[in-house]
Amino acid sequence: MSGSLESRKGKVVALCGGVGGAKLAFGLSRLLGNDLTLIVNTGDDFEHLGLAISPDIDTVLYTLSGLANPELGWGRRDESWNFMEALDALGGETWFRLGDRDLALHVERTRRLSSGESLTSITGSIAAHLGVGAQVLPMSDMPVRTMVATSEGVLPFQRYFVERRCAPRVNGIFFEGAKEARATPEVISALQDPKLRAIVVCPSNPFLSIDPILSVPGIRARLEQARVPVMAVSPIIGGKAVKGPTGKIMAEFDVPATSQAIARHYSGLLQGLVIDDADADDREAVPCAVHVSRTLMKSKEDRVRLAGEVLEFADRFATDASSREPA
């Protein structure tokens, strides 16, 4: 990463969800601080045990604040499980595990939502209390729910992902409530900020984490019309997905697990795609500019290094944004 990166100024918006997205968001936040805005998937949100759960928002908040559980990849570190043990003894639903520390966030979010406060306002307040400098925005304050059409019928996302552990075959994915939803003024403002430097699509699951964001009316159009570089990091490494159901879903949709397929999935949006060294031979087949790097983020240093490369890749096009040719 060149030393000139520090001298380049401007706002950056990143779309993310899940653990992979949160890792790159961490790297971007270390480099950009409050010049970073994260638009986070809320298609995974659901009500459980009477509580409003926002898994992707919480993963981002915990990761950026240094509170994420490094062993599990979700939830808070230094967690205890007394609540779940007591619930199990009562015969309650324990398929979705809520740690004692994590529970506090859900209780507070539910209380404030019930009083009429918006999810955007609540998320911003919690981020501030946790010392997160980046602006963390839900994709919408209106409910959008990812529904998975499977061999066992239509399942809400968490039932498919957590309870059934992605076992059923996926036949289709749709986003309930997306047509009626609206992007918040904060999301629109971030995407239209005159100081915007770049838009980054994190290496999140394209189908389950990024597509819900793009399903909210107005968001995809603003990416298509962006006057700044729109860059993505491929979640594919060596022809396989790093983690989660991405590879399984691509196979069930008869989509090859390649960076070319990722670029085509985001057709009309991208100016550039960052791919892994292991897929370097595929660069000529990718229908947009390509940067080859080590995209597996095993350490915090990996996250910051990759984030820096993504920003520098975007900056190569910043002076010629009007001539961008979408993938």
Image: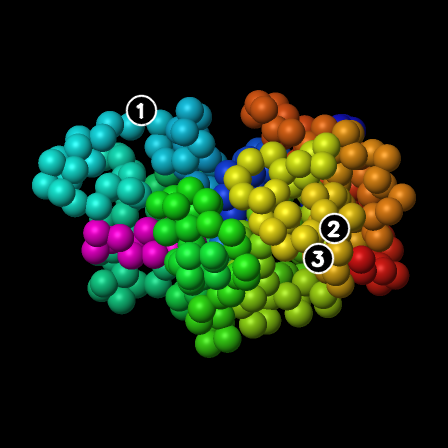
- Label 3 and label 1: CA atoms lie apart by 38 Å
Q: Nearer the viewer, residue 284 or 139?
A: 284
Question: Can see residue 63?
Answer: yes
Front position in the image: 291 or 250? 250
Type of the residue with mark 1 = Asp
Q: Which mark is residue 261?
A: 2
The N terminus sits in image quarter: top right
Dot 1 alpha-carbon crowd within 10 angstroms: few under 14, some 14 to 19, many 20 or more: few
Task: Read off the magenta span.
Answer: 43-56
First of labels 2, 3 by sequence position = 2
Question: What residue is drawn where x is 60% and y is 66%?
Answer: 219
- Label 3 sits on residue: 266
For mark 2, give the secondary structure: helix
Res 13 visible:
no
Q: Nearer the viewer, mark 2 or mark 3?
A: 2
Corner quadrant of residue 190: bottom right
Q: Amino acid at mark 2?
A: Ala
Residue 323 point in image, percent of width and height = 88, 61
Quadrant of the image containing the C terminus: bottom right
Measure the alpha-carbon separation of dots 1 and 2: 39 Å
Answer left or right for 219 relative to 227: left
Instruction: Give the labeled residue for mark 1.
Output: 78
